[in-house]
Image (cartoon, rainbow, N blue to C red):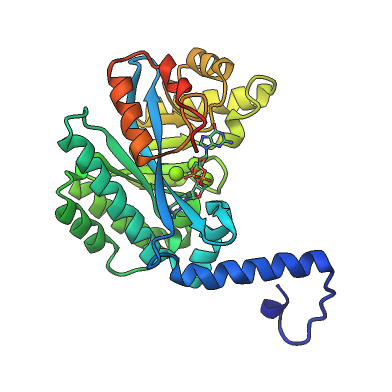
Amino acid sequence: RAKEQGRNTYCIYTPAINSRTSELLIIENSLHRALERGEFVVYYQPQVNTIAGEIIQMEALIRWQHPTLGFISPATFIPLAEETGLIVPIGEWVLRTACRQNKAWQDAGLPPIRIGVNLSARQFQQPNLVEMVAQILSDTGLNPQFLELEITESIAMQNAELTRSILMEFERMGVGIAMDDFGTGYSSLGYLKKFPFHTLKIDQSFVRDLITNPNDVAIITAIIALGQGLNLKVVAEGVETEQLKELLHTLECQHMQGYFFSRPLPASDATKLMGQARKKDLVKLSCLAGVS
Ligand code: C2E
Ligand code: MG
Ligand code: MG
Ligand code: MG
Protein backbone atom coordinates (compact mmCIF):
# COMPACT_ATOMS: atom_id res chain seq x y z
CA ARG A 1 0.00 0.00 0.00
CA ALA A 2 1.30 3.42 -0.99
CA LYS A 3 0.25 4.94 2.33
CA GLU A 4 2.50 2.58 4.23
CA GLN A 5 5.40 3.12 1.88
CA GLY A 6 5.62 6.80 2.77
CA ARG A 7 4.75 10.15 1.23
CA ASN A 8 7.33 10.13 -1.53
CA THR A 9 6.11 6.98 -3.14
CA TYR A 10 4.56 7.28 -6.57
CA CYS A 11 1.71 4.99 -7.26
CA ILE A 12 0.05 4.39 -10.58
CA TYR A 13 -3.61 3.64 -10.21
CA THR A 14 -5.51 1.63 -12.72
CA PRO A 15 -9.31 1.56 -12.60
CA ALA A 16 -9.18 -2.06 -11.43
CA ILE A 17 -6.92 -1.27 -8.48
CA ASN A 18 -9.08 1.75 -7.71
CA SER A 19 -12.33 -0.15 -7.46
CA ARG A 20 -10.64 -2.91 -5.47
CA THR A 21 -9.24 -0.29 -3.09
CA SER A 22 -12.57 1.46 -2.65
CA GLU A 23 -14.30 -1.83 -1.99
CA LEU A 24 -11.74 -2.58 0.71
CA LEU A 25 -12.36 0.90 2.14
CA ILE A 26 -16.11 0.28 2.26
CA ILE A 27 -15.48 -3.05 3.92
CA GLU A 28 -13.10 -1.55 6.45
CA ASN A 29 -15.53 1.23 7.33
CA SER A 30 -18.48 -1.06 7.81
CA LEU A 31 -16.41 -3.55 9.79
CA HIS A 32 -16.49 -1.10 12.70
CA ARG A 33 -20.24 -1.37 12.91
CA ALA A 34 -20.79 -4.96 11.85
CA LEU A 35 -20.68 -6.42 15.33
CA GLU A 36 -23.21 -4.04 16.89
CA ARG A 37 -25.42 -4.37 13.81
CA GLY A 38 -25.54 -8.12 14.23
CA GLU A 39 -24.12 -8.87 10.78
CA PHE A 40 -21.85 -11.72 11.88
CA VAL A 41 -22.93 -15.33 12.11
CA VAL A 42 -21.00 -18.33 13.36
CA TYR A 43 -21.06 -21.44 11.17
CA TYR A 44 -19.97 -24.86 12.38
CA GLN A 45 -18.04 -27.54 10.52
CA PRO A 46 -17.71 -31.06 11.90
CA GLN A 47 -14.47 -32.89 12.50
CA VAL A 48 -15.04 -36.61 12.26
CA ASN A 49 -13.40 -39.77 13.49
CA THR A 50 -13.83 -41.87 10.38
CA ILE A 51 -13.10 -45.16 12.19
CA ALA A 52 -15.65 -44.69 14.95
CA GLY A 53 -18.02 -42.95 12.54
CA GLU A 54 -18.57 -40.06 14.91
CA ILE A 55 -18.50 -36.31 14.96
CA ILE A 56 -15.84 -35.53 17.55
CA GLN A 57 -15.66 -31.76 17.29
CA MET A 58 -17.14 -28.73 15.55
CA GLU A 59 -15.05 -25.79 14.35
CA ALA A 60 -16.60 -22.35 14.74
CA LEU A 61 -16.08 -20.27 11.57
CA ILE A 62 -17.25 -16.69 11.34
CA ARG A 63 -19.39 -15.43 8.46
CA TRP A 64 -20.22 -11.82 7.58
CA GLN A 65 -23.46 -10.97 5.84
CA HIS A 66 -22.89 -7.40 4.66
CA PRO A 67 -26.11 -5.42 4.00
CA THR A 68 -25.07 -4.22 0.51
CA LEU A 69 -22.00 -6.22 -0.48
CA GLY A 70 -23.51 -9.55 0.54
CA PHE A 71 -21.45 -12.40 1.88
CA ILE A 72 -17.84 -11.47 2.67
CA SER A 73 -15.34 -14.27 3.22
CA PRO A 74 -13.27 -14.37 6.42
CA ALA A 75 -10.21 -14.61 4.17
CA THR A 76 -11.02 -11.00 3.16
CA PHE A 77 -12.12 -9.41 6.42
CA ILE A 78 -10.14 -11.28 9.11
CA PRO A 79 -6.85 -9.69 7.92
CA LEU A 80 -8.54 -6.25 8.04
CA ALA A 81 -9.96 -7.00 11.46
CA GLU A 82 -6.46 -7.93 12.60
CA GLU A 83 -4.91 -4.75 11.18
CA THR A 84 -7.50 -2.53 12.83
CA GLY A 85 -7.63 -4.42 16.12
CA LEU A 86 -11.33 -5.13 15.63
CA ILE A 87 -10.50 -8.83 15.78
CA VAL A 88 -10.33 -8.45 19.56
CA PRO A 89 -14.05 -7.75 20.16
CA ILE A 90 -15.05 -9.88 17.15
CA GLY A 91 -12.98 -12.83 18.38
CA GLU A 92 -14.49 -12.50 21.84
CA TRP A 93 -17.98 -12.54 20.33
CA VAL A 94 -17.18 -15.68 18.29
CA LEU A 95 -15.81 -17.42 21.38
CA ARG A 96 -18.87 -16.55 23.45
CA THR A 97 -21.28 -17.57 20.70
CA ALA A 98 -19.49 -20.88 20.11
CA CYS A 99 -19.23 -21.79 23.81
CA ARG A 100 -22.90 -20.93 24.35
CA GLN A 101 -23.85 -23.08 21.35
CA ASN A 102 -21.80 -26.04 22.54
CA LYS A 103 -23.40 -25.82 25.99
CA ALA A 104 -26.83 -25.72 24.32
CA TRP A 105 -26.00 -28.90 22.38
CA GLN A 106 -25.02 -30.62 25.61
CA ASP A 107 -28.14 -29.38 27.39
CA ALA A 108 -30.21 -30.77 24.50
CA GLY A 109 -28.78 -34.20 25.27
CA LEU A 110 -26.47 -34.53 22.27
CA PRO A 111 -23.25 -36.49 22.88
CA PRO A 112 -20.71 -33.99 24.26
CA ILE A 113 -18.12 -32.81 21.73
CA ARG A 114 -15.48 -30.14 21.71
CA ILE A 115 -15.87 -26.81 19.99
CA GLY A 116 -12.84 -25.45 18.15
CA VAL A 117 -12.38 -21.66 18.04
CA ASN A 118 -9.71 -19.81 16.03
CA LEU A 119 -7.62 -17.20 17.82
CA SER A 120 -5.63 -14.49 16.08
CA ALA A 121 -2.24 -13.01 16.93
CA ARG A 122 -3.80 -9.74 18.07
CA GLN A 123 -5.76 -11.56 20.75
CA PHE A 124 -2.50 -12.91 22.17
CA GLN A 125 -1.31 -9.33 22.64
CA GLN A 126 -4.24 -8.61 24.96
CA PRO A 127 -3.10 -8.81 28.58
CA ASN A 128 -6.43 -10.31 29.62
CA LEU A 129 -6.79 -13.13 27.08
CA VAL A 130 -6.75 -15.91 29.67
CA GLU A 131 -9.22 -14.08 31.95
CA MET A 132 -11.49 -13.38 28.97
CA VAL A 133 -11.61 -17.08 28.06
CA ALA A 134 -12.14 -18.11 31.70
CA GLN A 135 -14.95 -15.55 32.04
CA ILE A 136 -16.74 -16.81 28.93
CA LEU A 137 -16.45 -20.43 30.08
CA SER A 138 -17.89 -19.47 33.43
CA ASP A 139 -20.67 -17.29 31.92
CA THR A 140 -21.77 -19.99 29.49
CA GLY A 141 -21.26 -22.88 31.91
CA LEU A 142 -19.18 -24.81 29.36
CA ASN A 143 -16.65 -27.20 30.89
CA PRO A 144 -13.15 -26.14 29.67
CA GLN A 145 -12.46 -29.65 28.38
CA PHE A 146 -15.04 -29.04 25.65
CA LEU A 147 -13.19 -26.05 24.21
CA GLU A 148 -10.17 -26.21 21.91
CA LEU A 149 -8.40 -23.04 20.81
CA GLU A 150 -6.81 -23.11 17.35
CA ILE A 151 -3.66 -21.08 16.81
CA THR A 152 -1.26 -20.79 13.89
CA GLU A 153 2.51 -20.99 13.83
CA SER A 154 2.78 -17.25 13.22
CA ILE A 155 1.23 -16.60 16.64
CA ALA A 156 3.71 -18.91 18.27
CA MET A 157 6.56 -17.10 16.55
CA GLN A 158 5.66 -13.53 17.39
CA ASN A 159 6.47 -13.77 21.06
CA ALA A 160 7.33 -17.34 21.88
CA GLU A 161 7.84 -16.92 25.62
CA LEU A 162 4.62 -14.99 26.17
CA THR A 163 2.65 -17.36 23.93
CA ARG A 164 4.04 -20.33 25.78
CA SER A 165 3.07 -18.99 29.18
CA ILE A 166 -0.46 -18.20 27.95
CA LEU A 167 -0.83 -21.67 26.45
CA MET A 168 0.40 -23.25 29.68
CA GLU A 169 -2.37 -21.41 31.53
CA PHE A 170 -4.96 -22.75 29.09
CA GLU A 171 -3.46 -26.20 29.59
CA ARG A 172 -3.86 -25.85 33.37
CA MET A 173 -7.48 -24.79 32.89
CA GLY A 174 -8.12 -27.92 30.82
CA VAL A 175 -8.67 -26.06 27.54
CA GLY A 176 -7.31 -27.89 24.47
CA ILE A 177 -4.85 -26.28 22.05
CA ALA A 178 -4.59 -27.07 18.35
CA MET A 179 -1.91 -26.01 15.91
CA ASP A 180 -3.84 -24.92 12.83
CA ASP A 181 -2.59 -24.92 9.23
CA PHE A 182 0.33 -27.09 10.33
CA GLY A 183 3.21 -27.16 7.90
CA THR A 184 2.67 -23.74 6.33
CA GLY A 185 4.70 -21.67 8.80
CA TYR A 186 8.21 -21.81 10.20
CA SER A 187 9.92 -23.79 12.92
CA SER A 188 6.98 -26.08 13.52
CA LEU A 189 9.04 -28.79 15.13
CA GLY A 190 10.62 -26.67 17.85
CA TYR A 191 7.24 -25.30 18.85
CA LEU A 192 5.70 -28.75 19.00
CA LYS A 193 8.16 -29.61 21.74
CA LYS A 194 7.83 -26.34 23.55
CA PHE A 195 4.09 -25.73 23.55
CA PRO A 196 1.32 -27.86 25.06
CA PHE A 197 -0.52 -28.80 21.86
CA HIS A 198 -3.13 -31.55 21.82
CA THR A 199 -3.95 -31.47 18.12
CA LEU A 200 -2.20 -30.89 14.80
CA LYS A 201 -4.36 -29.79 11.92
CA ILE A 202 -2.61 -30.60 8.64
CA ASP A 203 -3.11 -27.69 6.28
CA GLN A 204 -5.37 -28.37 3.34
CA SER A 205 -2.62 -27.45 0.89
CA PHE A 206 -0.99 -30.82 1.68
CA VAL A 207 -4.28 -32.69 1.43
CA ARG A 208 -5.69 -31.22 -1.78
CA ASP A 209 -3.36 -32.95 -4.28
CA LEU A 210 -2.61 -36.02 -2.21
CA ILE A 211 -3.96 -38.39 -4.85
CA THR A 212 -1.56 -37.21 -7.53
CA ASN A 213 1.39 -35.84 -5.59
CA PRO A 214 3.76 -38.34 -3.97
CA ASN A 215 5.53 -35.51 -2.14
CA ASP A 216 2.32 -34.72 -0.29
CA VAL A 217 1.94 -38.39 0.60
CA ALA A 218 5.45 -38.33 2.08
CA ILE A 219 4.75 -35.13 4.02
CA ILE A 220 1.46 -36.36 5.43
CA THR A 221 2.93 -39.74 6.34
CA ALA A 222 5.67 -37.95 8.26
CA ILE A 223 3.23 -35.62 10.06
CA ILE A 224 1.05 -38.55 11.10
CA ALA A 225 4.06 -40.45 12.46
CA LEU A 226 5.19 -37.33 14.27
CA GLY A 227 1.74 -36.89 15.80
CA GLN A 228 1.62 -40.49 16.92
CA GLY A 229 5.07 -40.23 18.46
CA LEU A 230 4.21 -37.02 20.32
CA ASN A 231 0.78 -38.33 21.31
CA LEU A 232 -1.09 -35.63 19.41
CA LYS A 233 -4.37 -35.95 17.59
CA VAL A 234 -3.75 -35.35 13.88
CA VAL A 235 -6.57 -33.93 11.79
CA ALA A 236 -6.51 -33.64 8.00
CA GLU A 237 -8.23 -30.47 6.79
CA GLY A 238 -9.87 -29.93 3.41
CA VAL A 239 -11.00 -33.51 2.70
CA GLU A 240 -13.30 -33.01 -0.27
CA THR A 241 -13.72 -36.47 -1.78
CA GLU A 242 -14.28 -40.07 -0.78
CA GLN A 243 -11.08 -41.01 -2.61
CA LEU A 244 -9.11 -38.62 -0.40
CA LYS A 245 -10.80 -40.00 2.69
CA GLU A 246 -9.83 -43.55 1.69
CA LEU A 247 -6.23 -42.63 0.94
CA LEU A 248 -5.90 -40.82 4.28
CA HIS A 249 -7.29 -43.94 5.92
CA THR A 250 -4.54 -46.08 4.47
CA LEU A 251 -2.03 -43.52 5.76
CA GLU A 252 -3.55 -44.11 9.23
CA CYS A 253 -5.15 -40.73 9.52
CA GLN A 254 -8.51 -41.13 11.22
CA HIS A 255 -9.52 -37.57 12.04
CA MET A 256 -10.72 -35.45 9.17
CA GLN A 257 -12.55 -32.27 8.35
CA GLY A 258 -13.78 -31.17 4.95
CA TYR A 259 -16.56 -30.67 2.44
CA PHE A 260 -16.85 -34.42 1.84
CA PHE A 261 -18.33 -34.77 5.33
CA SER A 262 -19.99 -31.38 5.55
CA ARG A 263 -19.52 -27.75 4.66
CA PRO A 264 -19.60 -25.27 7.54
CA LEU A 265 -23.28 -25.00 8.54
CA PRO A 266 -25.44 -22.50 10.39
CA ALA A 267 -26.20 -23.60 13.95
CA SER A 268 -29.63 -25.04 13.16
CA ASP A 269 -28.30 -27.27 10.37
CA ALA A 270 -25.30 -28.27 12.47
CA THR A 271 -27.71 -29.33 15.21
CA LYS A 272 -29.68 -31.48 12.74
CA LEU A 273 -26.46 -33.01 11.47
CA MET A 274 -25.40 -33.95 14.99
CA GLY A 275 -28.77 -35.57 15.58
CA GLN A 276 -28.41 -37.61 12.39
CA ALA A 277 -24.80 -38.56 13.00
CA ARG A 278 -25.87 -39.84 16.39
CA LYS A 279 -28.03 -42.38 14.62
CA LYS A 280 -24.65 -43.30 13.10
CA ASP A 281 -23.87 -43.80 9.43
CA LEU A 282 -21.46 -41.05 8.50
CA VAL A 283 -22.31 -41.52 4.85
CA LYS A 284 -25.33 -39.38 5.59
CA LEU A 285 -23.05 -36.52 6.53
CA SER A 286 -22.29 -35.90 2.89
CA CYS A 287 -26.02 -35.69 2.11
CA LEU A 288 -26.34 -32.59 4.22
CA ALA A 289 -23.43 -30.86 2.52
CA GLY A 290 -23.98 -27.84 0.35
CA VAL A 291 -26.09 -25.70 2.65
CA SER A 292 -23.59 -22.90 3.18
P1 C2E B 1 -9.06 -22.33 9.19
O1 C2E B 1 -9.16 -22.10 10.65
O2 C2E B 1 -7.90 -23.14 8.71
O3 C2E B 1 -10.45 -22.96 8.76
C1 C2E B 1 -10.60 -23.91 7.74
C2 C2E B 1 -11.09 -23.26 6.46
O4 C2E B 1 -11.14 -24.23 5.43
C3 C2E B 1 -12.50 -22.68 6.55
O5 C2E B 1 -12.56 -21.55 5.68
C4 C2E B 1 -13.33 -23.81 5.99
O6 C2E B 1 -14.59 -23.38 5.50
C5 C2E B 1 -12.45 -24.28 4.88
N1 C2E B 1 -12.72 -25.66 4.49
C6 C2E B 1 -13.19 -26.67 5.26
N2 C2E B 1 -13.28 -27.82 4.56
C7 C2E B 1 -12.85 -27.55 3.31
C8 C2E B 1 -12.71 -28.33 2.10
O7 C2E B 1 -13.00 -29.52 2.05
N3 C2E B 1 -12.21 -27.67 1.01
C9 C2E B 1 -11.88 -26.34 1.03
N4 C2E B 1 -11.42 -25.79 -0.08
N5 C2E B 1 -12.00 -25.58 2.15
C10 C2E B 1 -12.48 -26.18 3.26
P2 C2E B 1 -13.26 -20.20 6.13
O8 C2E B 1 -14.45 -20.50 6.95
O9 C2E B 1 -13.41 -19.37 4.89
O10 C2E B 1 -12.17 -19.53 7.07
C11 C2E B 1 -10.91 -19.19 6.56
C12 C2E B 1 -9.95 -18.82 7.68
O11 C2E B 1 -10.41 -17.63 8.32
C13 C2E B 1 -9.86 -19.87 8.78
O12 C2E B 1 -8.98 -20.92 8.40
C14 C2E B 1 -9.32 -19.03 9.91
O13 C2E B 1 -7.93 -18.86 9.76
C15 C2E B 1 -10.02 -17.70 9.67
N6 C2E B 1 -11.19 -17.61 10.55
C16 C2E B 1 -12.46 -18.06 10.37
N7 C2E B 1 -13.24 -17.77 11.44
C17 C2E B 1 -12.43 -17.13 12.33
C18 C2E B 1 -12.63 -16.58 13.65
O14 C2E B 1 -13.71 -16.63 14.25
N8 C2E B 1 -11.54 -15.97 14.24
C19 C2E B 1 -10.32 -15.91 13.61
N9 C2E B 1 -9.30 -15.32 14.26
N10 C2E B 1 -10.10 -16.43 12.41
C20 C2E B 1 -11.13 -17.04 11.76
MG1 MG C 1 -9.06 -23.32 12.26
MG1 MG D 1 -6.67 -24.60 9.06
MG1 MG E 1 -6.43 -21.35 7.65
* Extreme residue toward the front, this view: 68
Residue 201 in the image: x percent, y percent?
A: 45, 36
Q: Nearer the viewer, residue 86 or 25?
A: 25
Residue 254 higher or lower than 196, as above or below = above
Q: Nearer the viewer, residue 96 or 289?
A: 289
* Quadrant of the rendered image containing residue 93: bottom left
Residue 53 higher or lower than 7, as above or below = above
Residue 192 in the image: x percent, y percent?
A: 41, 42
Residue 228 higher or lower than 44, as above or below = above
| Left-right relation of 248 to 22 | left
What residue is rendered at 25% in x and 62% in y?
132
Quadrant the N terminus occupies: bottom right
Q: How many marks?
A: 0
* Quadrant of the rendered image containing residue 214: top right
Residue 196 in the image: x percent, y percent?
A: 32, 44
Q: Nearer the viewer, residue 23 or 37?
A: 37
What residue is rendered at 42% in x and 56% in y?
40
Residue 152 higher or lower than 145, as above or below = below
| Left-right relation of 176 to 120 | left
What residue is rendered at 79% in x and 81% in y?
9
**From where the camera sits, is residue 85 visible?**
no
| Left-right relation of 138 to 128 | left
Residue 239 in the image: x percent, y percent?
A: 53, 27
* Quadrant of the rendered image containing residue 101: top left
| Left-right relation of 252 to 143 | right
